[in-house]
């Protein structure tokens, strides 16, 4: 039997799942599109994918990224673990059984507090003894910290996932704005995008915009007539394999 050297990174949410399987120089990436109304609905799509992956591979490390809008960013200096649930209560309704989780980004000085989809973690634990779980917004934060220089330039990352999109804005490496919006069509995207644009008082000469994820080419066509600095990049595999 091969040593358990492969690392599986999987992202799952209400609008699909994707995974990246690393094994030295040999990699595998795939995406499955679906739409469900809640975390329980994801289970019927996740299990067949895991059955397929674990049947043919010896996995040494598993990471799952929970993709949903139930998160809030908190400055690290102000973050109190004992108050984690209260940060979320300003954005979403919590039930008694809900418990917040958080991802700390020491270099950036921010904490992403979120509601984990515990049922998905439990499914993965049927396949392996231990997993690491995070929120998908952290992938964009990691990418920004690794690829954006320390300067005053505004840069915007837009990541689509089939039914919603994440939009983050950084000035240099400093996170200035982050949110997730529903997107049924291009008009939805433009409405929320320009809401963020006005909120941050940008002009068409200032922010650099990177679009990634499914369907971003049509968004590019809409934005290129408005702003001078917009590009599409295929970052999905890059994001899922970030350390």
Image (cartoon, rainbow, N blue to C red):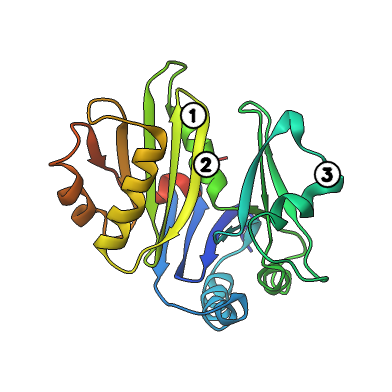
Residue lying at 52% horizontally and 45% vertically, measured from the top left: 139
Residue lying at 43% horizontally and 26% vertically, measured from the top left: 148
The residue positioned farthest toward the right in the image shown: 82
Horizontal side of residue 24 vs 227, given as left or right = right
Residue 242 disc label: 2
Compared to 70, does 82 lie above or below?
above
Q: Which residue is mark 3?
A: 81
Label 3 packing within 10 angstroms: few (<14), some (14-19), many (20+):
few
Compared to 175, does 239 lie above or below?
below
Marks 2 & 1, CB-CB < 8 Å contact: yes
Depth check, mark 2 against mark 3: the one in front is 3
**143 or 52: nearer the viewer:** 143
Label 2 packing within 10 angstroms: few (<14), some (14-19), many (20+):
few
Residue lying at 62% horizontally and 60% vertically, measured from the top left: 59
Horizontal side of residue 101 vs 71, given as left or right = right
Residue 210 percent location from the top left of the image? 31, 40
Depth check, mark 2 against mark 1: the one in front is 1
Upstream in sequence: badge 2 or badge 3? 3
**What is the distance, in whole Å, between disc 1 and disc 3 at their CAs?**
27 Å
Residue 11 percent location from the top left of the image? 53, 60
Q: Splitting the image into 4 quarters, where does residue 108 fall?
A: top right
Residue 164 percent location from the top left of the image? 41, 62
Q: Which residue is mark 1?
A: 146
Which structural element holds mark 2?
loop
Residue 118 percent location from the top left of the image? 72, 68
**What is the distance, in whole Å, between disc 2 and disc 3 at their CAs?**
26 Å
Quadrant of image for the N terminus: bottom right
């Amino acid at each position: 039997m091969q040593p358990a050297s492969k690392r599986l990174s999987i992202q799952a949410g209400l609008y699909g799942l994707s995974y990246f399987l690393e094994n030295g120089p040999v990699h595998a990436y795939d995406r499955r599109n679906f739409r469900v109304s809640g975390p329980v609905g994801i289970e019927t799509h996740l299990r067949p994918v895991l059955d397929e992956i674990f049947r043919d591979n010896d996995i040494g490390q598993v990471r799952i990224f929970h993709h949903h809008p139930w998160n809030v960013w908190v400055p690290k200096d102000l973050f109190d673990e004992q108050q984690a649930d209260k940060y979320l209560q300003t954005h979403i309704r919590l039930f008694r059984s809900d418990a917040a989780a958080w991802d700390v980004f020491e270099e950036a000085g921010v904490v992403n507090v979120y509601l984990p989809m515990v049922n998905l973690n439990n499914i993965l634990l049927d396949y392996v003894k231990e997993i690491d779980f995070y929120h998908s917004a952290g992938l964009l934060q990691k990418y920004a910290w690794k690829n954006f220089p320390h300067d005053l330039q505004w840069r915007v990352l837009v990541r689509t996932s089939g039914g919603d999109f994440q939009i983050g804005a950084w000035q240099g490496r400093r996170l200035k704005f982050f949110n997730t919006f529903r997107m049924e069509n291009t008009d939805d995207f433009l409405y929320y995008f320009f809401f963020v644009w006005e909120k941050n008082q940008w002009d068409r000469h200032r922010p650099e915009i990177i679009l990634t994820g499914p369907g971003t080419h049509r968004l590019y066509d809409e934005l290129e007539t408005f702003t001078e600095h917009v590009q599409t990049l295929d970052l999905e595999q890059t994001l899922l394999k970030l350390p």
